[in-house]
Image (cartoon, grey):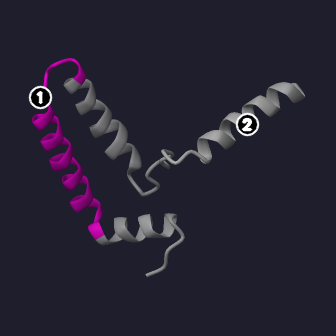
Amino acid sequence: MSPDAANNYLSAISLSLNSPNMVLDLRIPHNQQYQLDVLDAVITDFLTGKLTKEQAMQQIEQKWEQITNKVGRESQRAAYRASLGLTQ
């Protein structure tokens, strides 16, 4: 990568990380299940008109609860807090 290309790339990353609207990926076990298997699938169904907004929200909530209950709510909470650098 040329110095100019590297500078442009790093500048874009810096702008993203310093944006007040920046949201980090959820860093907990089974993240892929929450985001790809459930969220992406349900949003696709919503955007293609297969689900109403209310149905989509209900499906996401129900399926995320199933994952959380299977994995363990307290272990997920602990993993999330650790990802934020929080203890206890």
Residue ranking furthest to the right: 3
Q: How many marks?
A: 2
Q: Residue at x 18, y 48 (%)?
A: 61
> What amino acid does circle 2 point to?
Ser
Question: Which is more toward the observer, 21 or 6?
Answer: 21
Q: Whole-percent x and y of residue 60?
A: 21, 43
Q: Which mark is residue 52?
A: 1
Above-or-below relation of 63 to 82: above
Above-or-below relation of 5 to 28: above
Q: Residue at x 61, y 46 (%)?
A: 17
* Classed neighbour count for the residue bearing mark 1: other residues with Cα under 10 Å, few (<14), some (14–19), many (≥20): few
Q: Whole-percent x and y of residue 83?
A: 50, 64
Q: Tell me which label, 1 or 2, sits earlier in the chain.
A: 2
Residue 57 sits inside the magenta stretch: yes
Q: Residue at x 21, y 61 (%)?
A: 69
- Residue 31 shows up from this direction: yes
